[in-house]
Amino acid sequence: MDRIRLTITRLLGHAPQAADGIAPDESALAEKVAGFVIPPPLRLFYAPAGRHPALLNGFNVFALPHELPTKDGLLLFLSDNQGACCWGVVQG
């Protein structure tokens, strides 16, 4: 079991279910429409857990692939629950 799935299993107390994740073709469509590349580690997180509310919307909030905003050349994927701080990666 890969490290992300193992961590998710530990957090949830059970293995992630198919409905908890985002299919690779959905991530690929989001990339094509928005014109950006989702970093591989983020894709690895989305695949098993990209729809699970307990993992996406805790203290910090992950954006879904089709909602990933960009700003000043950054792909923003995570923000704190008050919107004061966000995490992103350089695109390009």
Image (cartoon, rainbow, N blue to C red):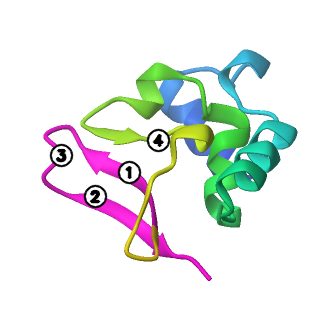
In the image, the segment drawn in magenta is: 75-92
> Quick one: label 4, few (<14), some, or many (20+) residues within 10 Å?
some
Q: Secondary structure at mark 3?
A: loop
Q: Residue at x 51, y 23 (%)?
A: 12
Q: Spatial distance from mark 3 to mark 1, Cα to Cα?
A: 10 Å
Say which residue label 2 marks: 86
Contact? badges 2 and 1 (CB < 8 Å) = yes
Instruction: State how far apart marks 4 and 3 are (Cα).
Output: 12 Å
Write down the residue under mark 3.
83
Compare residues 8 and 25 and report the one nearer the observer: 25
Q: Position of residue 32 (x, y in %)?
A: 78, 54
Q: Report the residue marked by disc 4.
A: 63
**Do the CB atoms of the residues marked 4 and 1 lie less than 8 Å apart?**
yes
- Which residue does the numbered mark 1 point to in the structure image? 78
Q: Residue at x 63, y 47 (%)?
A: 45
Q: What's the residue at 42%, 23% (across, down)?
A: 54
The one nearer the camera, 47 or 32, is 32
Amino acid at the residue labelled 1? Leu
Provide the secondary structure element on which disc 4 rests. loop
| Residues at circles 3 and 1 in contact by the CB criterion of under 8 Å | no
Q: CA distance from mark 2 to mark 4?
A: 11 Å
* 84 is higher (above) or lower (below) than 8: below
